[in-house]
Image: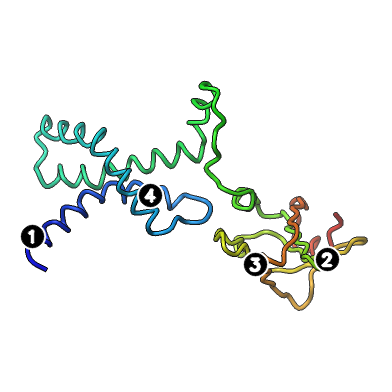
Amino acid sequence: MNFSDVDALKDMLALLAPGFIILMVQEAHKVGPRDSLQQRLFSYAVASTAYFAAIAPIVRHAGEVLCVPVLWAQVAEYAVFPAILGVILAVCRSRRWLDRISRLLKLPPIHHIPTAWDWAFPLQRNGVFVIATLENGDRFAGPWSPAAFASSTSGERDLYIPEVWDAKEEGPWERFEPKRAILLCGKDIKTIEFFNAGESNDEETTSGTTP
């Protein structure tokens, strides 16, 4: 690789850097499966093009007016402002502020979370029971907690329940002893239910919970 190739690579990385930073900040707060590498590279290019067309000239002009040193002006243009813009866009998307504009234009807003699975699990709080019914009719239940996990990979919607309870059709629910966890494969899950058992202490939960 000669010097011209190195310079061309550096220029390409510099052009993609703002879009990379903008979208990476959003990815950190995105719920759901990630795009492929090819899709992300295309998105970086589109985001960088929009940034250099609309935002970068303003940042560059502000640096000249304020007599900011060249190095710091470049840091601001290529890193700081893209990060700030990424945070702003992530907040707008998560709070769905742009939906108001869509409704004013009588356009159906598109939800930023792709599936009901990805939307439902982050809403659950401690005290909520997750009840999974499998294709063969078996039922597994357990309280949702920070140790529980629902996969956001589109290829396999598996579910990990760190504390399994006996979810009886009739009678109180009881925690299995000794304590056990279970990993359920997405292809085996038929339905997921969420049951709010309310706030309870350890003594109450060990005696059972009636749905």
Q: Residue furthest right?
A: 170
Query: At 22% across and 48% down in the image, what residue appears?
Result: 15
| Label whose residue precedes the other's in the sequence (2 or 1) | 1
Q: Position of residue 103 (x, y in %)?
A: 55, 25
Task: Report if the CB atoms under discs 2 and 1 are less than 8 Å apart.
Answer: no
User: How far is the residue under mark 2 from the one under mark 1?
Assistant: 65 Å
Mark 4, secondary structure of its residue: helix
| Label whose residue precedes the other's in the sequence (1 or 4) | 1
User: Which of the numbered marks, if any, corresponds to residue 79?
Assistant: none
Dot 2 corresponds to which residue?
137
- Foreground: disc 3 or disc 2: 2
Dot 1 corresponds to which residue?
4
Mark 3, secondary structure of its residue: strand
| Label whose residue precedes the other's in the sequence (3 or 2) | 2
Q: Residue furthest left?
A: 3
User: Which of the numbered marks, if any, corresponds to residue 160?
Assistant: 3
Mark 1, secondary structure of its residue: helix
User: How far is the residue under mark 2 from the one under mark 4?
Assistant: 42 Å
Q: Amino acid at mark 3?
A: Tyr
Q: Quadrant of residue 36?
A: bottom left
- Foreground: disc 2 or disc 1: 1
| Label whose residue precedes the other's in the sequence (2 or 4) | 4
- Foreground: disc 1 or disc 3: 1
- Does residue 147 appear to the left or right of 15 in the view shown? right
User: Which of the numbered marks, if any, corresponds to residue 25?
Assistant: 4
The quarter of the rendered structure image containing the N terminus is bottom left
Q: Amino acid at mark 1?
A: Ser
User: How far is the residue under mark 1 from the one under mark 4?
Assistant: 32 Å
